[in-house]
Image: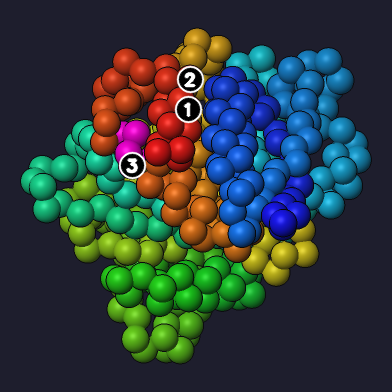
Amino acid sequence: MTAAPRTFRIAAIPADGVGKEVVAAGRAVLDALAETSKSSAAPFAFVWEEFPWGCEFYERTGKMMDDDGLEQLKGFDAIYFGAVGWPTVPDHVSLWGLRLKICQNFDQWANVRPVHFLPGVQSPLRKADDTELDWVVVRENSEGEYAGLGGRNLSARGHGGEVAVQSALFTEVGCERIMRFAFDLARTRAHKKVSSVTKSNAQQYGMVLWDDVFKRVAADYPDVETESVLVDAMSAKFVLKPEDLSVVVASNLNADILSDLGSALAGSLGLAASANLNPERRFPSMFEPVHGSAPDIAGQGLANPVGAVGSAALMLDHFGLPDQAARLNKAIEATTAAGILTRDVGGTATTDDVVKALIDALNA
Ligand code: GGG
């Protein structure tokens, strides 16, 4: 007798542009993976519900998501997200109305963004066969520069004297929890090192607090190597000494920028996966490719689904299925190694070609 499948309820929010294509791709690959588990001792299945939120929804309703959207999402095991943003809606409206709204209200304070070389993918950094790149950028995802604090002096608008203030919020609790997360992660890796990134020479309040908390937390992890690097120097280090890095912990804005740089150095933004985690599991966590909606290629079947499928692997890890996550990652490696690559990584394959190759690799 076969066991009843363990089911996971997932809220899919494709949102905008290529988000729709890569979420469909990820769902197809995950369903194929679940299919292979049917006759195993530990079958599992995904139950999907898709939400039509995003910029088209905004154009119809004036909102990026339903008023009770957060309530609707609360009971799910996870959220599988595509990308947000479209030229018809100001970027800060679409971002705050959907992605950041979910991250902040569901206290997804740890954004994990791994980046590594894939076989068969050319990278501007791969100077020699032994050049290594295997990092995890850990992004503080609840405060910092994206705390949403500030305002604009609208009365002076149009007179050339308008003033705007954008404040960054750093709390000791917020800094400490993301740093402990980074150190715990470093302990699971071969290269046990945490690099902390700030601009604390120029930003003398919040980022000096960040540095102070980093020193205090580091004292509890004597087995983990540490360094504190300014963000400008770290950008150079990403390019010049990639093998020296393992876990990089940074504030919301700095990590957002550095993780894009990291994925471009690995070959393409289209490859990068991410997890927005609520580590206490009080709310669903959200898994999404790092890339945005890419209006220039949307709807043409050119989107690279690898970042979305890698994010699905992070979701499987979160569900306590590390072996299945490893199977997905191996399927990605087999596909890129076979030269089945989308245009952003120098190939001619379509999104569907890559999905087919991934499913074939899972069934091989
Ligand atoms: N899938 C990621 C995405 O949609 N990103 C759009 C964006 O602008 N994000 C800004 C951020 O990561 O905070």
Return the x and y of residue 207 as percentages of the image width and height.
48, 66
Tell me the quarter of the image containing the N terminus. Answer: bottom right
Task: Please report the residue visible at 56 percent of the width from the left and 43 percent of the height from the top.
Answer: 36
Above or below, 328 relative to 229: above
Q: Amino acid at mark 2?
A: Asp
Q: Position of residue 142 (x, y in %)?
A: 64, 57
Task: Compute the Cα span from label 3 to label 1.
Answer: 13 Å
Q: Earlier in the sequence, mark 3 or mark 1?
A: 3
Residue occupying image coordinates x 30% and y 56% = 134
Q: Neighbour class for label 2 at 10 Å: few (<14), some, many (≥20)?
A: some
Q: Earlier in the sequence, mark 2 or mark 3?
A: 3
The three-letter amino acid code for the residue at tag 3 is: Glu
Please give the residue where the numbered disc 3 appears in the rendered image: 333
Q: Give the camera-side residue of 127 and 350.
A: 350
The residue tagged 1 is: 355
Label 1, secondary structure: give it.
Answer: helix
